[in-house]
Amino acid sequence: MRFITLMIILFQVVGCLNTPVKPPYQASILEVCTTSPEIYFTSKVNANRNMSHTQKRIAILDSLKESPSKTFMGKMFKGNWVFEEENEDAVFVGYSVRSHYIKIAVIYKDRGVETIICDSSNMKQTEDSIHGKAEKWKKTFNDLLRENMAEVYRNRHTLASAKLNVTENNVSFSYDDHANKGVLSVKGKSIQDRKWMLDKIAEICASKNVALSVNTAAAGGSFLVLDESIK
């Protein structure tokens, strides 16, 4: 009688499989960006875990201010941060100094936000490098954003209790088509009223229609806040 020996070998494959690479961010963000991860210069702006999506968005919009500069050269060559577009995952802001431009994606995270350089113009952008000013300008915005994130969270109870006072009967709007400048005023003073105004300005800039209905919403357009006042 012949015996057959059965040999069993247990093995593990290593270094031979192609592991799928997970994209660093959602498609809704990457499709807007032209940069590669080598020049994202990713930064985290941390916030309290309980900070809501709405509170983060308010802090981002509040950060769209002129970069502070006290020197003559700084005043001559400083730029402005402007709102450009947004989706459920991020807000995209731009910064221009003369012919130089960068776009930053401010990405919502569980604890705060992350910022990456998303696009640029006249900044010597390549696959793995970009002008050194881009990272410096981004850091300036991060500092503004960090301050506003803390400020908005400190005032979160005021924000939560603020009510929208805007109605279609107390809105005033004028626009100079030649100068591309407009004025929007409402009879209200709460932070919710201000948020409605910024949202509505974005809608107006995104279309040629003056969409001032309180209950309608549209995609946002680029704009720069020139001045604000409460009387």
Image: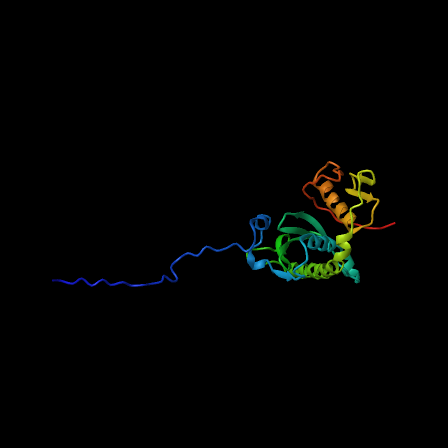
Task: Classify 11 as above or below 55.
Answer: below
Q: Which residue appears at 39% of the width and 62% of the height?
A: 15
x then y, percent, for residue 148: 73, 59
> Which residue is nearer to you in this view: 28 or 11?
11
The reply to whether residue 128 is visible in this rendering is no
- Report the front residue among 162 and 90: 162
Q: Residue 50 or 68: which is nearer the viewer?
A: 50
Residue extending farthest to the top is 209
Q: Residue furthest front?
A: 1
**Residue depicted at 78% across the width and 58% down the height:** 75
Q: In this view, which residue lies farthest toward the right?
A: 231
Count the marks.
0
Quarter of the image where one finds residue 63:
bottom right
Q: Position of residue 46 (x, y in %)?
A: 66, 62
Q: Residue at x 46, y 55 (%)?
A: 20
Point 77% across, 52% down: residue: 161
Report whether residue 146 is seen: yes
Quadrant in which residue 117 is drawn:
bottom right
Could you tell me residue 193's position as x and y percent? 78, 47
The coloring applied to the image is rainbow
Q: Residue furthest left?
A: 1
Q: Quadrant of the N terminus?
A: bottom left
Q: Is residue 81 left or right of residue 23?
A: right
Q: Position of residue 165 (x, y in %)?
A: 80, 45
